[in-house]
Image (cartoon, grey):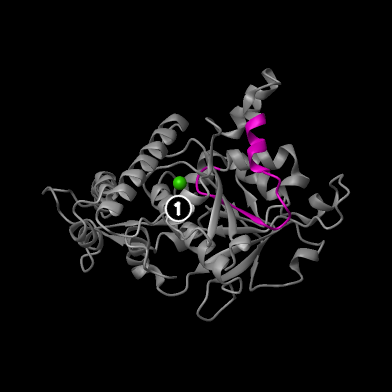
Amino acid sequence: MASNSRAKIIIDTDPGVDDVLALLLALSAKAEEIEVLLVSLVYGNTNVHGCLRNLLSMFESIERERNWRIEAGLPKGFETLERHPPVVAIGAEKPLEYEFVQMDRHPNYQRMKKSSMFFPAMIPDTVSIVCLGPMTNIALAATKEPDVFLRAKEIICMGGTFGVKGKVSPYADFNTYMDPHATAEVLRLTAPSFVAALDNSDKRTRPLNFKLFPLDLTIQHKLYEDSWLTCLESRPDSPLARWVNGFLTSAFDKSAATRQKEQGAVVRHAGESGGSPEKGRSISLNDPVCLWYFLASSQSPQSSSSSGSSWTYDHLHDVTIETDDAETRGRWTCTTSQTPDPLSYSRHDIQNVITRMIQSPPPGPDMFGHALLDRIFSCHYKF
Ligand SMILES: [Ca+2]
């Protein structure tokens, strides 16, 4: 890929464990592959200030890692971070329903200005926005200037669940549950009738290209503890590996405890395995899957198809988000699901259309953890 055509991305995130792994996956790319324009923070896994602490800690660890690699005679890695350091923006602290109340009381609330961070001279169809947390920041930007926001090439969203129970609700994934109003706002921009009614002079404006990576898909992509320990043992002096180990150890413990609880078992012994008996303890790589898609599609634009050895997907029509009912808050429903229909974006008899990713290509869910570690820690792996 030529340097002037590197893929550009905005990452909206609430850095907890798999957000950090997703960020490391993106920032370890070659300088000519991608450019991370902006990392915007949103409450979610923790409050937004905790998210900032985690992000700064990650940047410090990468810096120590690069110095260590230089001394060890290894490739420095993280080229895109060095060549194109991203802007970091602190975003929403609360869900949209509360944000709107605050803005009504304080018309000059700073948060609105910060939403303009999403429009850095956005040339149409050149910037992808990856959303790895509650969609509050995205909704604020999308509702402020929808015609400008629609210049985004695509939204890549980690959210939704259709057949898998979420962490905080049987009906919804964590991100949507936290701010269903925000997700509903963004989905309005996928409606042909809404976009057609926008008062703007750009007649080429088309509905938002919304790609959903639901829990059903992402939860299958695992990082096994054995894989991690092998990686760690191969580079015991790596500052980044030590830092990652600090939070991965507790993540494996927590994931195992959750599985034990789900299975109705009592954890009687410290260290008792909570993963699949054959494969050991693991965590799901929900957020990194979205970055993997972005990296793969930026290198091979034709990597999506409805079948074959690439990403598989279908289209959902008339998608709505439950915002009112307390029990089913954040549930995604759709009246139609079908295989890809190239004409669906121009049909006016449907409310909206999104793309739902169903299956990832090789190396596949079981090997994705290996591929992720290889890319972050040795920089030799090619998707
Ligand atoms: Ca996240």
Residue 285 in sight: yes
Which residues fall within the magenta stretch? 113-134
Residue found 40% across the figure and 72% down from its top:
364
* Picture layout, residue 268 above or below residue 140: below
Q: Residue furthest left?
A: 269
Q: Is residue 122 magenta?
A: yes
- Inspect the image, locate mark 1, and give the three-letter code of the amino acid beneath it: Leu
Report how many numbered discs are placed on residues in the image: 1
Q: Position of residue 56 (x, y in %)?
A: 40, 37
Instruction: Please identify the quadrant where the C terminus is shown.
Output: bottom left
Q: Closest to the observer: 380 or 45?
A: 380
- Give the crowd class for mark 1: few <14, some 14-19, many >=20 residues within 10 Å: many
Q: Position of residue 290 (x, y in %)?
A: 50, 58
* Picture layout, residue 12 above or below residue 162: above
Residue 216 in sight: no
Q: Position of residue 220 (x, y in %)?
A: 39, 64
Q: In the picture provided, is 298 more to the left or to the right than 19?
A: right
Residue found 67% across the figure and 57% down from its top:
126
* Picture layout, residue 135 above or below residue 368: above
* Picture layout, residue 301 above or below residue 86: below
Q: Position of residue 113 (x, y in %)?
A: 66, 30
Residue found 37% across the figure and 66% down from its top:
368
Q: Closest to the observer: 274 or 46?
A: 46
Instruction: Please identify the quadrant where the N terminus is shown.
Output: bottom right
Q: In the picture provided, is 278 more to the left or to the right than 323?
A: left
Q: For mark 1, give the secondary structure.
A: helix
Quadrant in which residue 107 is drawn: top right
Q: Which residue is mark 1?
A: 27
Q: Is residue 258 magenta?
A: no
Quadrant in which residue 145 is drawn: top right
Quadrant in which residue 272 is drawn: bottom left
